[in-house]
Amino acid sequence: MLGALGFERGHPLDTWESLQVHKGDATLTITAMPGKHSAEEAVNELLMPVNGHLLDFSRNGEQLYRLYVTGDTMLVDSLADIPRRYPDIDLGLIHTGGTTFLVTVVTMTGEQGVRAVEITKPRTAIPIHYNDFSVFLSGLDDFKKAAGTSTASTEFVYLAHGDTYTFKPNV
């Protein structure tokens, strides 16, 4: 499927498996994170498997920045393993929206997205993917409301379509 889009060398990764990409003295390590579309196995059987990704940016062996992308996961117990294995997440991109499929929700609602932030503990979190389709039940307002009552020490940042976020490496 990706070949038709011009991607010639895909690398499938199982959960916790990593791939390193090097360019000069820079290294990007991509690690597959746990994820599931649904707590209902029958629904998972109908959908493609999902996972999140952790992107570790480093130069000359020095860690510069850690980015966690949840992917289209629901809250699953294995999310708690992420901060144990990979602490010090600088930025979390949190897929929310409460996407519906058949009679179930297959992406986190705003409230669940904030709970994922509390579990994974990024320093900064940005909700994404909450208004891309017409099948969303939980928009940005739901995420903001839950974030407003969260005890997480995370900074929540909200971007409109087309906005950019600039992060500074840890140097």
Image: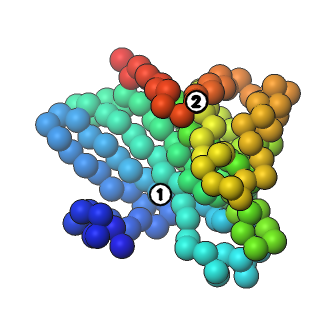
Q: CA distance from mark 1 to mark 2?
A: 27 Å
Front: mark 1 or 2: 2
Q: Quadrant of the N terminus?
A: bottom left
| Residue 46 on image: x %, y % | 64, 80
User: Please, is residue 76 above or below residue 4 in the view?
Assistant: above
In this rendering, would 14 be left or right of 37?
left
Whether residue 113 is visible to the viewer of this picture, yes or no, is yes
Residue to which mark 1 is pinned:
32
Using the rendered view, name the quadrant where residue 103 is placed.
Answer: bottom right
Determine the residue positioned at 78% across, 34% down. 141
Label 1 environment density (alpha carbons within 10 Å; few <14, some 14–19, many ≥20): many
Q: Amino acid at mark 1?
A: Ala
User: Please, is residue 167 above or below residue 110 in the view?
Assistant: above
Q: Quadrant of the C terminus?
A: top left
In this rendering, would 59 be left or right of 54?
left
User: Please, is residue 125 above or below residue 105 in the view?
Assistant: above
Who is closer to the viewer here, 20 or 49?
49
Determine the residue positioned at 58% across, 30% down. 160
Q: Amino acid at mark 2?
A: Ala
Residue to which mark 2 is pinned:
160
User: Please, is residue 108 above or below residue 86 in the view?
Assistant: below
